[in-house]
Structure formats: C-alpha cells, structure tokens
Image: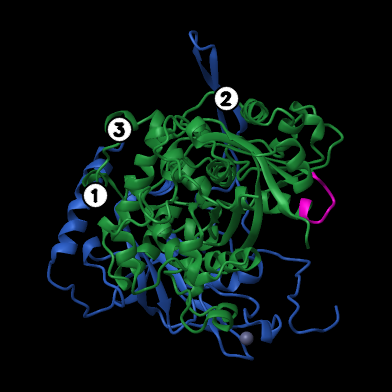
Amino acid sequence: MTGDKRLHRIPDKVEYDQRHSDDFRGDVKEVGFHFCGYDYDTAEEQLKIYLHYDQLYYWKLAELSKMGKGFLDGQLWGTKCPKCGDKFFPPRVNCWNLDCNLEKTEWVQLAQKGVVHTFTIAGWSGKSSLKRLPFVLAYVIVDGCKTAVANELRGLKPWDAEFGMPVKVVWAPKKERRAAITDFHFEPADGWKPGPMNPEKERMKELCEPVYEWVKSMQ
Amino acid sequence: MTRRVCIAGGAVTPFDYPMHLEPESMVANCIVETQQDIPDFHLRDLQFMVYSHFSVHFGKQLCPEWIVHDHLGLVGLPHIRIENGGNTGGSALYGAFLAVKSGLFDVVGVAGWETMDNVTQSQGSEFIALASDTRYEALAGGIYPIYYAAMAYKFMKEHGLTEEDFALAALKNRNNAADNEKTQWYRGEYQQYKRDLTVDDILKSRLISYPLKRYDCCLMSRGAAFCLVTSEEWAKKNADGKYVVIDGAGLSSCTIRAGDRLAFPAWTEMYGKGYPDMTEFAACRRSGEVAYDMAGIEYKRAVKEVDVAEIHDAFSSSETQIYKALHWCDKDSIRQFVREKRTFMEGELPVNPGGGLMGYGHPVGATGIMSAVECYYQLTDMIPKKHRSSKTYVRDADVGLVNSHAGTGTSISNFILRRP
Ligand SMILES: [Zn+2]
C-alpha cells in the first residue's frame, strides 16, 4: 500500500457479528442442474427438455456496507466528494469528476426526503414483481444529490403521481429489512394532496384497470 | 486511414418466439444464405470471427460461441465474443470494422444470436434486467420497459408529444414488417392485422409501463444474423455490385443508471448543463456525431443526406427520441417531424423499412447485425428479393444509417453505410 488515500482498504479478516438467519441459513436447497421433464412433438421431431437451475448467491456489499447497514437501521447514507462537493445517492465510492481523479468520497447521512424527477406506472414486470402490479416506479432526487434513485412510490393512486412532487422515505418493518434497496420505498410527503382528476389521469386509470384484474387472477 | 471497410454480404434467420433451431444451425443457415447472394464467399476466406451474443443466462451455457465456431469447422481461426447489451450486434460490427480497418484482417465474419424463448417472458424480462444495476434498479422491480417508460414520459411532457405520437413509430415499423416473412410480426400477430394496424390498436393494447403499451414494445425472440465485413479490395473482387462501404462508425457510452445523467460532469463538459437529463440519449448523439464526422456529413444536413435508416426501436418512444439525438429534428421541430410522418416509407427518410425491432423481434445478439444487413440490402437493391414485395424498397438510396442501442442508452453505436 502506498498510503494513497483514494485507495479502498481491503479487509483481510472479517467476522460477521450481526447475522440475520431467519429465512435462509441452513435449509435452502441449492439444487443446481435438474432436468425435470420433456415435451416431444412427433410430427416435427422436436424435443424440449425442462431444466431447473437454482443457486444461492452471496452478494457482498463490501465498501458499500455502510449504506446497507444504514438500511437496517433506518438511515440513508450517501457519499460526498471532499474536493468538489458533489453528493450521491446511490453512493459512488470515488468521485465521478475526472478532475477529481478518483478522489475517495466520504459518507454523509441524508435527509429522508426527496423530489420526484420522473416516474412511470408499471403494468408489466419481471417474474418477482408481477404480483405488485401496477406500481409506480419513481426516480427521486434525495436530499439535494446530483443523481436520482429509482424506487417504488406507494401511498397514492398510481395516476395521482406527479413530476416534482415531494416524497419521504418509508421503511419496511425492522424485521423485514434485508440491507437492500427494497428496505424502503417512497411515499408522498406529509401534507401533499393529489391534484383533481383530468383526462390524462383518467387515461392512466383506464389502462390500470385490466392490470388490477389480471393480478387478481394470478395464483 | 485510407483503407475502406465494407459489408459484402449478410443474412438473417427468421426471428420468432418460439423458433425451433439451435444457435449453430441458425448461424449456418445465415452463412448459406449469404453464399447464395455472394457465391464467391467460402468459409475458407474467413480470417477472424466476431461473435455477438448477449446473455449466457438464456442458454445456461458459458462461451456458447465456442460451440458455434467449432460447428462451422473454423478451428484454428481466431475468435472473440462481444457482449454489450442491446448494442451487442452494433458493438460486434464495430469490432469487425476495427479489425479490418487496422489492416490486420481482410475478411471477418460477424455472427450473432439469442435464444430468449428458453425462458418465460416474465423470467426473460428479469434476466435482461440483470444488465441494469441490480443492487438498486432490478431489485426495486425495474425492468427495461419500465426504465424506458420513465424516461419517455418526461421526454413526452417536455416536447409536447402524446402517446399517439409514439404510436406512429410502432405502427410504421410493424406495418413495414408486413412484407418481410422473416419478422416475428409477420409470422405471428400480423395475421390478425395485416397492413392495417392502427394508432387505436396500439393505444388499446395492454399497459406495459405508462406511456408504453404492448404494441409500443418490441418482442422477445429467438434468432440469428450474420454479416461479412471485408476490405474493399476483397469486396470489389468477390462481391462486386453487392457491397457497401462503412463510411462512418461511432460508439459511445452513458451511465448504467438513467438517474445518474442529470449532471454528469463529462456530459456537462461536452454538451452543457442539464444534458442529457433523463430524456435524451447522449451516447446516441455522440456516436452519431462521430459517425457523421467520419463520413463527412454535416449534423444539420443529416436528415437530407441519409436516405434510409435502421434504428433500434426497442420501444416506439426510443425511436422517437433517437430522431432528435441524431440531429434530424430539435425540440421545436420534433412534433412536426413526427406528425408529418417523415420517417414513413413515403417520407424523406424512411426508418426501419424492414420492420425494425418492432417487426422483427429482438433476439439481442442478432438484432444490431440484422439492422446492418437490412440497410445493406437497401443499398445493394436486394430488398425486392429479400422482402415479399417492393413496397419497403427505398429506391436509389445512397446513404444508410444503422443504429444499435443498449441499456437505458448506456451504449450506442451508429454507422454510416454508403454505396461504393
Ligand atoms: Zn469530486
């Protein structure tokens, strides 16, 4: 090590004194490859094999750990460049300014509020999120950061969301937190009231109706 | 840098979901079809292979290019695989361009494929979302149509556009595909609409993420494409009358998270404060400018000089946003540009006559190559033979533009193709 402050320290011995083991440790089946069935079409001589493949991953947050630990404690940590002052959430562990030449940023605790930069109402999503549809995914500028973070905006009718609306951070119950971005979501700031219905909102509402019906029909 | 690089052949398999062909057969089919057009091209001519394949998740097979390469009988020949999200095809073409331009090789094959029908569509959406920052975005439920919708909604608001304006791109490309039996649209739901898909059909289709509906989005797909990139000397000798010159090539990058574009110092330095925000594709603007510069095209005249374009229309909104990024219109003229249908077949700059991603489908590793091949067909007058009619043939086109696009605009390439 040269003593250059921009270098991130690599801890060579880490002992995890806080552990959360409720829902995976010990009894998660890592099945690996499992050929579990087939279909055969005689006319076209087409054979299709069903492959199930499952794996438990470890996702080290390493130098971003402070952010993850903050989530567990209901705190929002971002980073700030000591040279140029740019502030980031999601955190960047080195500054993005080429002139700052990879200056290592410092952790700063952020106020748990922000402003919606843009948003959309999702009516379709990945496998893990289908049952939450329709939901609002908003890009929120948290506490004066230079960047916006995407997360779910709840606590309002999807069609009532607005550009520039003030929002607050709302945490999942402590025992449900997993040190991940999903430990919190956004909700309208206290005192915010949606504007009156208008043709655009009616249109969004109309588009949402079949999505609500479809989600209800899912097992 | 006087050595000129050419495209001297290429072909695409049908794109479909599902389609029952393995990657090695798909690539073999493309090479056979290329040989039908360019009889002088033999596998023995190849000196280097660039493979274009996005996600090993779909096949649960690392290095699947090794399977294809040895199946083609090309052992001993150097190969690399390029993976660059939705811009995988464009980036592989860029790699082949560099390889020939450098003088190291004269004949380079670019072969790409994706087998997205190996998983369900919701699982596939999630697989692709693994190319976003999983720590923040995918985990929060985001998939690409959602990210694009959030960007498009702000773009729509700030430019006075409507859902109907976006729908025009979707309508155009899908109806263009009505003549092209290799497209997924032709092979599937086209049967229901033929050439008459309307704006209303698009507005009525199911919500994907506001303002995008189902018909505003391209289709997940299985398919492959092949393109032959050669020196001009080889092309002239072996593919006379059937080659085009790659006159400009640009590749550029932007942030992985769209939310990080509001004030990125490198963009501020280049284009000023507030650009690209979350509404613009700065990497498209930049790579377009690099390609225009190389080809000697003045930005403001691009819309006049380019005769036909194949644009990465994963979403109707992104095609519309790209019109502006490529300097074809600006904030004030974009509404008029869209509403006057200048990119329709009868307009001044037909875009995606082959159907684009909306029509063809989007088997990621094959897509950018498909776009280049379609543009190549236009500039070598092969469209009437390749599509089922001449309705999507842009006669006398001299200059073509090929665009390939990844992430939320995270990596974008642009190429200018010219008749020799
Ligand atoms: Zn800095």
Q: CA distance from mark 2 to mark 1?
A: 34 Å
For image coordinates 57% across by 47% down, the residue present is B368
B103 in magenta? yes
Give the mark toward the camera: 3 or 1: 3
Q: Which mark is residue A202?
A: none
Give the residue number, with chain letter if any, for mark 2.
B21
Residue in the picture at 19% in, 49% down: A209
Tell me the subunit letter for badge 2: B
Residue type at mark 1 is Leu
Mark 2: which amino acid?
Leu
Task: Identify by letter the chain in green.
Answer: B
Q: Which chain is blue?
A: A
Against B360, is A98 above or below? Answer: below
Q: Which residue is mark 3?
A: B194
Label 3's element? loop
Nearer to the camera, A169 or B53: B53
Q: Residues within 10 Å of mark 1 (few under 14, many from 20)?
A: many
- Tell me, yes or no, whether the two marked residues, 3 and 1, touch with CB atoms within 8 Å: no
Magenta stretch holds residue A44: no
Secondary element type, mark 1 = helix
Residue at far top of view: A42
Residue occupied by mark 1 = B203
Which chain's residue wears label 1? B
The magenta region covers B100-106
